[in-house]
Image (spheres, rainbow, N blue to C red):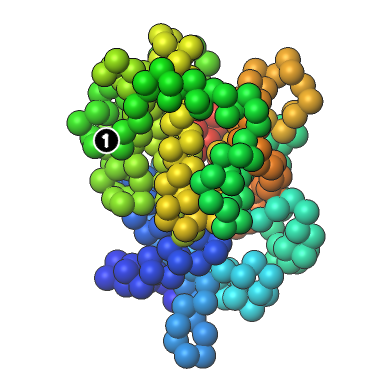
Amino acid sequence: MEILTPNQYGEYEEFVSHHPMGGFTQSAQWRLVKNNWGYEAVVSRGPDGAIRGAVGVLVQKIPFIGTSFLYSPRGPVCDLHDREVLADLKQGIDALAKKHNAHAYKMDPEVLASDQEFLDIAREMGFTRFYGPDGFETIQARFNYRLYLQGRSEEELFANLTQKTRYNVRVAMKKGVEIRVVGPEYLDDFMRIYQTTGQRDGFNTRPKVYFQRMLEALGDHVRLYMAFYQDQPIAGAVTTNYAGKTCYVYGASDNVYRNVMPNYLIQWEMIRWAVETGCTVYDFQGISGELDNEANHMYGLYRFKRGFNGQVDELAGEFDYTYQPIKAKLVDHALNLHGALGRLKRKLRG
């Protein structure tokens, strides 16, 4: 294993951005978005010296306990059935835990809940698995709705939409809704609509500076889409395109002109971006795991995403390794006592 120096991050980025298990939160550039965290990168090399596995690690200091918490969002990036590579990367994590006096390490790799081989490997390595029943108790959503593109053309994918969703996309087109890829100069408009969405749907919103960092750090791997009606911005989305995956990360829709269906057309345009760039999947991201519960406040979001005729992927969840059990319990107790556990999880998301 090798803990990289910043001048080696280019090599790391080249590996992660082209690996089928890569994702934008494992990009070395993600450290610039999460700039209130420390950052480390670990790699495992083969006999030829080439990287065969990598993991980016965010480091959060816990001042009132004096330890650190290590977290790899959607890491590691490797063949998750290769025990040798996983063990090598784990040695790097152990070294970081010692360096930063970590009480615990968490990873939530891009692995399905049905992957029993990986579950067995993680258990044998000493990890404890955590997953919530509806998928939102974990930092990253555990149930994702995904459209696997399978090399299909735009015409084939459009024909594959449900009849209702095709109709709504066409309504937006007929009404003259225009979708544009815009720059940071439209962030104020996006934030206004995004905050309106948060108030309407009951979720906490991120500050403008977060999206500024995201657009700047990820560069060509991220886009800000805005929907305009009568030249007025009425919906928006932040979407990444990285390692063969296009991910719908943040969305916003105004309370006005919802009848012109801008959200349907903006999704379709982002799917078109995925097709144009040769992606294998368009990821609508999180939904509730309560797929049959129409009373669940997240059901409407699932119904909307389902119209694009993809599939639900249940991911395995989080895997925790504890280095200092007593201090880990103290941290959990302190966070719960101060109501900060929820805030920490929200801080980690994205």
What residue is rendered at 47% in x and 58% in y?
278
- Residue that carries the numbered disc 1 in the rendered image: 182
Residue 248 visible in the snapshot: yes
Left/right of residue 191 with respect to residue 344 in the rendered view: left
Residue 283 image position (x, y, % from top left)? 55, 44
Question: Which residue occupies the foreground of this view, 66 or 95?
Answer: 95
Q: Name the residue at 34% across, 42% down.
A: 223
**x and y, in percent, of residue 263 in the image:** 47, 25
Amino acid type, residue under disc 1 in the picture: Val
Residue 58 x, y percent position in the rendering: 44, 52
Q: Is residue 283 left or right of residue 42?
A: right
Which residue is drawn at the image coordinates 57% and 53% (left, top)? 152
Please tell me how crowded label 1 is: few (under 14), some (14-19), or many (20+) other residues with Cα within 10 Å: some
The residue that appears at 27% across and 70% down in the rendered structure is: 7
Q: Nearer the viewer, residue 163 or 300?
A: 163
250 is higher (above) or lower (below) than 273: above
Q: How many marks?
A: 1
**Residue 320: x and y, percent?**
64, 52
State the residue lying farthest toward the bottom. 48
Query: Is 49 placed left or right of 21 in the picture?
Result: left
Q: Secondary structure at mark 1?
A: strand
